[in-house]
Image (cartoon, helix red, strand yellow):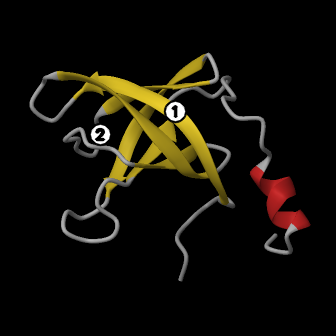
Amino acid sequence: MDRRRQQRVFVDLPVRIWGMDAHSRPFMQPASLRTISGRGATLQGVDAQLKPGDVVDLQYEGAKAQFRVVWLGKPGTEMQGEVGIESLSTDTQLWDVDPLRCAAATGQG
């Protein structure tokens, strides 16, 4: 059973992320968004060592927002480098995609 509370839309959007890693060292790196929803997203290509609860800043097309790390892909699997994030800002919309409208248009809603 799917535990997700919101529809996800598959995308491939370039972003930049930065913050403090699990060892309290600053990092900055490019990544990409794999899925987005109204409150969160899945990043891929993340090399920084993070842990659930960490806060990262994300920039997409000049707009910036903070996100909390919710889950991490398990090392050694095809999910390695993927990070689930949840927005800490209720009033910032970084991407111009409405997941509910996209899901309905593709028959997934």
* Foreground residue among 43 and 88: 43
The reply, left or right, for residue 64 in relation to residue 94 is left
- Report x, y in % for residue 56: 37, 29
Label 2 crowd (10 A; few <14 / some 14-19 / many >=20): some
Checking the image for residue 15, the label placed there is: 1
In the image, residue 81 above or below residue 87:
below
At label 1, which amino acid type do we have? Answer: Val
Which quadrant is the C terminus positioned in? bottom right
Checking the image for residue 53, the label placed there is: 2
In the image, residue 51 above or below residue 4:
above
Discs 2/1, front = 1
The reply, left or right, for residue 90 in relation to residue 98 is left
Checking the image for residue 66, the label placed there is: none
Residue at 65% x, 59% y is 8
Q: Residue furthest right?
A: 105
Looking at the image, tell me whether mark 2 or mark 1 is earlier in sequence order.
1
**Is label 1 in a helix, a strand or a loop?**
strand
- Report x, y in % for residue 108: 79, 73
The reply, left or right, for residue 100 in relation to residue 57 is right
